[in-house]
Amino acid sequence: MNQRPKNGPPGSVRIIAGQLRGSKLPVPDRPGLRPSAERVRETLFNWLQPYLHGARVLDLFAGTGALGFEAASRGAGEVVLVERDPDLARSLREQATRLKVEQVKVLAEDALAWLARSPGPGFDLVFLDPPFAAGLWEPAAAALAPWLAPGALIYVECPRNVTPSLPSGWTLHREGHTRDVHFALHRVGD
């Protein structure tokens, strides 16, 4: 992530690969907004590449949308971005329009309230990367079951010193870490 200069415009993150490669997404100055580091996203999407073409993707705590837009850039068929902050949701819609990605849908809603609704078609891939201070991994993971397609992949990012309790049906597929962050890809039903 580009750091925000003092009294300057917000920073940005760039899309790493695919049709939107090099496009920048704004990072507004918001408490708890912490886009996944480029190195982490690069590793994650190397893991995901065989699964992305035509996938139905949910970015549950979208923030800047870096994960969801990267998935769209690399061939996901549908990407749903859920973001409760109305200004961030508006920015996500503006970015989807600017980047001409019609498969991206933005919902300005609270993620847990949205998950409590009747589910639609299952998602093949879910990004579960809530604001770290909110501690929402467990309630969100528990509410995801009816929203998942068979064999779905769930990406979980958390502080390196946190081990969220995840549903018993999730099998660890791949994991990694940086100095500050632990990230893991889980599969349902394996």
Image (cartoon, grey):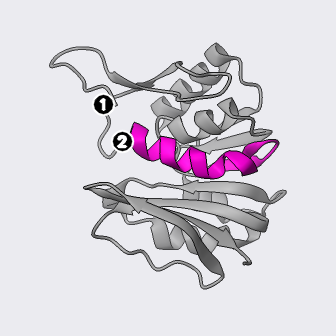
Amino acid, disc 1: Asp
Q: Is residue 42 visible?
A: yes
Residue 114 at x, y = what percent?
64, 56
| Dominant secondary structure (helix, strand or loop) of the stretch shown in magenta | helix
- Residue situated furthest left in the rendering: 6
* Vertical comparison of 111 with 107: above or below: below
| Residue at (15% x, 19% y) in the render | 6
Q: Bin the neighbour count of mark 1 within 10 Å (Cα to Cα): few under 14, some 14-19, many 20 and up.
A: few
| Residue at (62% x, 22% y) in the render | 20
Amino acid, disc 2: Leu
Question: Which range of residues does the magenta coloring cover?
Answer: 36-58
Q: Is residue 36 visible?
A: no
Residue 33: mark: 2
Residue 16 at x, y = what percent?
53, 29
Q: CA distance from mark 2 to mark 1?
A: 7 Å
| Residue at (58% x, 22% y) in the render | 21
